[in-house]
Image: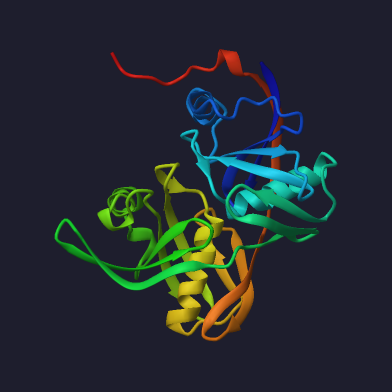
Amino acid sequence: MKINFTKMHGAGNDFILVDDRKGDVPWEDYLMMAALASRRTGIGCEGIILIQKSDKADFQMRFLNPDGTEAALCGNGSRCAAAFANSIGAAGKDLTMETICCGLVGAQISDTGVCVWMPEPSHREYGLELNVDGNLIRGDFINTGVPHLVVQVPNINAVDVDSLGRALRLYPVFEPDGANIDFVNLRAPSRMAMRTYERGVEEESGACGTGAVACAIVAVETAGFTLPVKVKTPAGFDLVVGGDWRKQKCTGLTLTGPVKFVYNGSIELDDLELGGDVD
């Protein structure tokens, strides 16, 4: 089977986008989807996004992690999905997309980027203390569509994101699903830099939209920041988290930032090298 695809990135977060409105992409074959996402033997990406038909919104966005598993939501992926859906005529510039676990998500496309309205945050657990190899790590847990642990650090460039991120992502308190781990350096006024170890990617991500929202919420609710908050990604792009402040909590959150069409291509799925057990 041959599919056409578009490679895009949102603030450094890269994705494969496919028009699946006919419903013929075998997205449930996680080995094939993982092979498609592989950087060495496939196209390479931090997520596969399918634009599918919906009877509730302009389209349905289905998001697959690089390991082929399905994710509830991706902030930068949603922004890329909006721009891609508009480019193929599936939606206008003011649109609504259906997500698998987070309901309907609104988006707006402008000359300066794409804005999406994020789901309401939930499951806040601030002030967690976790012991990793004898070191006490303090963090704040929040779900912004997917779970995040926000860890404040004095030097964002000195963090061993892959090593410490992996240890925290698999920490027993987050079982069975684990969590994304965001390392953030707060920079007044209302600016910050962040790096993310992303579950499903299982390494440092180029950017993380839901993580940017998580870091902004923690900074506003615990460190005196005010919305909007600018978040610098590892690739040097700015994401802007906006919203309201009501009853000592953030609500009505938005994520705005750049998206870019990188290239178009096609690939034979049957020719992909599927992973498996090592003999």
Q: Residue at x 79, y 55 (%)?
A: 95
Q: Quadrant of residue 247?
A: bottom right
157 relative to 231 in the view: left or right:
left
Does 33 sit above or below residue 218?
above
Does 134 sit above or below residue 251?
above
- In this view of the protein, can residue 104 be seen by the observer? yes
- In this view of the protein, can residue 187 be seen by the observer? no
Q: Quadrant of residue 62?
A: top right
Q: Quadrant of residue 120?
A: bottom right
Please identify the residue farthest to the front as the structure is shown: 55
Quadrant where the N terminus is found in the figure: top right
Residue 210 place in picture, x, y as percent: 54, 59
Q: Residue at x 60, y 18 (%)?
A: 269
Residue 211 place in picture, x, y as percent: 49, 60
73 relative to 203 in the view: left or right:
right
Does 8 sit above or below residue 35?
below
Residue 144 place in picture, x, y as percent: 52, 62
Q: Residue at x 61, y 25 (%)?
A: 26
Q: Please give the count of numbered marks on the rendered protein.
A: 0
Quadrant where the C terminus is found in the figure: top left
**Picture colour scheme:** rainbow
154 relative to 229 in the view: left or right:
left
Residue 213 place in picture, x, y as percent: 54, 65
Q: Residue at x 54, y 78 (%)?
A: 190
